[in-house]
Image (cartoon, helix red, strand yellow):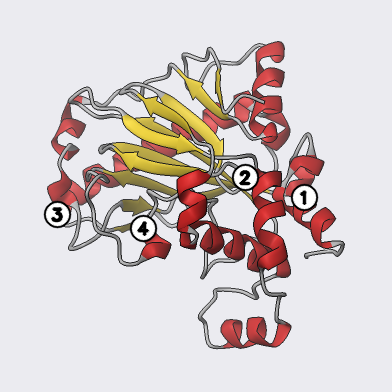
Amino acid sequence: MKPIESIAVHDWQAPIAAQLAAQALDALEAGSVLRLPLPFTLRAEERTLLSPQLLSGTRKNISYNPASGRLQGADGDAVLETRLRGFLARYHASARALVEHLFAPYRDALIDGRASYRPAEIAGRVPKSWRHDDTRVHVDAFPATPVHGRRLLRVFNNINPHGEPRRWQVGEPFAAVAARFVPRAPKPNALQAQLMAATRITKSLRSPYDHYMLQLHDGMKADLGYQAQVHKTAAEFAPGETWIVYSDQVSHAVLAGRYMLEQTFYVPVAALQYPERSPLRVLEKLTGRALL
């Protein structure tokens, strides 16, 4: 498995040759970051959106919910918000078309998450806490939103108008992360999960799977020795590039960059071509129990 796999796709909407699609799906589910020479071209009126001043307060991103049309995180007038909503809706539609063509087995199972626009520079930003410090290598997990084994498929694009790359680091494979951090993690507590759901700390009942994923996320970020010693592969994504990753599987850190788009999709394990590679199956094998 290569940490970064280049895939020659140049169109968001066009059908993709079966051999290339099979190569991309294999690499994605093995834990590679897919790099595509695929720009998302801004329309003339959208160039007014290339400003961090659009962010509201201390927000680091502007989000758009495709299901409801709700926009959050923007600090602008009604005209700018309408333009942002159309911009992010267009990115969502493009990302969904790409994923449906590139990963055909997912087509009928794909669940839309939010689209996100991140115009602010990440380098030098002071996070709320170490848990929010994405410059530390981590796998993604959501404290308030249990996913119950569903995969976090993310489609990123760099629209930076100044030629600046998005700088990442990719860490060790998921199986190595899990083998290192699961043995030191506390066991799931069913009563605690029920209390968190009842008091709306979590949006639904946190499953044992979600518990372990959060333990990996927090354990990695909290361990400064691990952060210093673990092997990392540097990656720079230039303006005009798209990259696709299962961010629940690929350990990664984000070091620098601004003006980036991201679309999240949720993929059930049953839709995967290689479900045995999923974090759910890896964690179940490691813990010796069903986690859902």
Q: Amino acid at mark 1?
A: Val
Left or right of residue 147: residue 175: right
Measured as percent of width and height from the top left, residue 270 is found at 79, 46
Seen from the viewer's position, the closer of residues 240 and 113 is 240
Compute the Cα span from label 1 to label 4.
36 Å
Q: Which residue is mark 2?
A: 249
Disc 3 on helix, strand or loop? loop
In the image, residue 249 sits, relative to residue 44, either above or below, namely: below
* First in sequence: mark 2 vs mark 4: 4
Where residue 4 sits: x, y (%)? 54, 25
| Residue marked by disc 4 | 70
Callout 4 secondary element: loop
| Residue position marked by numbered label 3 in the rendering | 76
Q: Is residue 99 visible?
A: yes
Q: Residue at x 22, y 55 (%)?
A: 74
Task: Describe the element under mark 1 as helix, strand or loop.
Answer: helix
Mark 1 or mark 3: which is in front?
Answer: 1
For badge 4, the amino acid type reads: Arg
Residue 167 position by quadrant: top left
Residue 79 seen in the current view: no
- Mark closer to the observer (2, 4): 2
> Quick check: 51 above or below 55?
above
